[in-house]
Image (cartoon, rainbow, N blue to C red):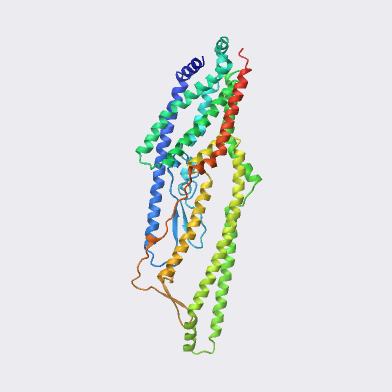
Amino acid sequence: MFAILIQKELKHILLGPKFISTFLICTVLILLSTFIGVQDYKAAQSSYDAGTGLTNQRLSEKTSWSHMSSTVYRRPDPMRIFSIGISNDLGRFSPLSEGEAIRLDHSVYSDNPIYAVFRFLDLGFIFQVVLSLFAILFTFNAINGEREMGTLKLTLSNDVPRAQYVLAKFAGSWLSLIVPLFIPLLISMLMIIAMGVPLAAVHWVKIGSFMGLSILYLTFFIATGIMVSGMTRNSSGSFLILLIFWVSSVLIVPRVGMMLAAKIQPAPSIAEVDAQIDEYSKDRWNEYIADIEEGFAVRQAATEGMTDEEAQAYRDDNEWDWMEQGEKERLAMQTDIQNYRERLMENLNGQKHKQEVLAMGLSRLSPASAYMHAAMQISGTHSDMKDRYESAIREYRTQFMNYTEEMKKKTGMDNINGFSIAISSDGTAEMSIPKDQKPIDASSIPQFIDPEQDFSDVFNRSTIDIALLLIFTAAVLIAAYATFMRYDVR
């Protein structure tokens, strides 16, 4: 009997006009999003290759290890094809120098604002918005529609247990919506392979997890549609209730959660932090310049009463010590500025993290938001992507600076970018360029390694959201069963 009820539900859905139209729309959207995602990934990869190539070329043209600087580029991940997350909002590269803050700049949306207006179409968006709405369209009249036609009373007048009937409704709706999706999804996977996207074994595991998560999310909306259909007397009423729930869950609750978190747990803006850093930096530079002027005045006073030859000899004897002292003071000043910047940024990141945790906690009241968080975690495009990269770049900067300092001492290149500095008798500095300088060996410089996430780490980060979706789905299924057991078929 249970199999017969499922077959009846499948025939009712598959032979109806809704199925053909929704299947065609879903197929076009899935294939289109895959094609756009692959093209976007290839464009990001080309930009990455060009940027890293230019950086390596500039390093190879350097003639001194002094005051070395570089640029670190963020490598695009193929998983952005499925859920782009904050990939295009996050900067593509960060400058790497001794006194400059680590910050990813020049995002796709900042360089091309038109993309920020329309955003990108990815599979995560299709599942979260489009297919969840189609799940409602398939199930809003699953039970009350049968009551309105009189077939529900006729069916239950036979020896058909209500439990089997409601479970058959759910199974038939699930099969008719989920199984046909495997056709366009399989084609999209073949498209990704044919277009030459490099996918490792861990990527396939993540793709499988992403698809399983998406099916669980659609299962929730299928069960919700059946539950509401079994709670109302007419299909128009159930459709209105489900539409309001869908708008609230998908569009409103995630945004309201962020707004409430910003009010409950405020954090200073980056502009306010930059202003504090700039003010402190100016004060330290002024102190440094004042110390230089004071030291110069002391040296000038020491040569009073000396002949020109004696003054020049005095300067020649002490010139190197003065330069070393000046360099130490400059490094101390820059270290103070850097430490102050890092303290402020650490405090800002701490406050931002608390705000983000609160925002995600509030938004998780929505199954759509829980799905979004888990999908981005699996794809590696969640908001923690920024901290992960900036932390890795900060560690690499220490490694880069230590290596260049070691090479400067090893090669004896203590001049500034190949320039020699001499102090004339009147106290002015003269710079000269030594002849026949050879470029440094840039190939020996340590390379930046993009931070990788093990799948176990990814799964642990998305466990809460997956568990919430399971709880939401189980609760709705139980409610649908309990409601239909008391449903008045008249």
For residue 415, above or below residue 386 = below
Residue 173 seen anywhere in this rendered image of the structure? yes
Q: Residue at x 34, y 73 (%)?
A: 435
Residue sitting farthest toward the front: 456
Q: Residue at x 50, y 74 (%)?
A: 324
For residue 438, above or below residue 12 = below
Pick the quarter of the image with the C terminus.
top right
Residue sitting farthest toward the right: 264
Horizontal and vertical percent position of residue 227: 59, 23
Q: Is residue 170 left or right of residue 80?
A: right
For residue 294, above or below residue 79 = below
Number of labels in the image equals: 0
For residue 434, above or below residue 316 = above
Q: Quadrant of residue 256?
A: top right
Horizontal and vertical percent position of residue 177: 48, 25
Q: Nearer the viewer, residue 239 or 409?
A: 409
Residue sitting farthest toward the left: 436
Horizontal and vertical percent position of residue 94: 47, 55
Horizontal and vertical percent position of residue 22: 46, 26
Residue 244 seen anywhere in this rendered image of the structure? no
Q: Quadrant of residue 140?
A: top right
